[in-house]
Amino acid sequence: MSFLAVYESHFTKHLTQTQFEAFRILLWLLTVHKQVRIESLAACFPLPILYQSRRKHIQRFLVLSALAIPRLWFPVIKAIICKEFKTGSRLIITIDRTQ
């Protein structure tokens, strides 16, 4: 199963095309640079604007109401779990909050 396909099908329903592209770029930056600090991501964000503008762009994107956990992330997690695990099987979810 392609997790990217699940993300794309769900996120395109809730985000504009521009917001979805910003999401794709941020996801790519996170996987390549393995940094979650906004300053680090802004330094590498491929927009032809000033560094401070890129940083503010990322900050504005991350506080979008469309990215709210119950509205966007829970349905994505549910879709992945439903596709990967059989009904009635035991599933233990561990959440790690690191920087």
Image (cartoon, helix red, strand yellow):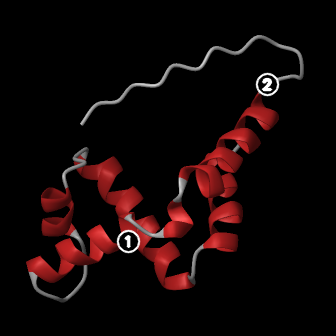
Q: State whether residue 4 appears in this view.
A: no
Which residue does the numbered mark 2 point to in the structure image? Answer: 85
Which residue does the numbered mark 1 point to in the structure image? Answer: 61
Question: Label 2 amino acid?
Answer: Phe
> Would residue 57 appear left or right of 48 to someone viewing this image?
right
Q: State whether residue 95 appears in this view.
A: yes
Q: What residue is at 75 percent from the left and 44 percent from the top?
A: 79
Corner quadrant of residue 53: bottom left
Give the x, y percent position of residue 24: 45, 66
> Would residue 95 appear left or right of 87 to someone viewing this image?
left
Q: Which quadrant holds the N terminus?
A: top right
Give the x, y percent position of residue 85: 79, 25
Residue at the far right: name it: 87
Give the x, y percent position of residue 65: 51, 68
Q: Which quadrant holds the C terminus?
A: top left
Task: Mark 1 vs mark 2: give the one in front.
Answer: 1
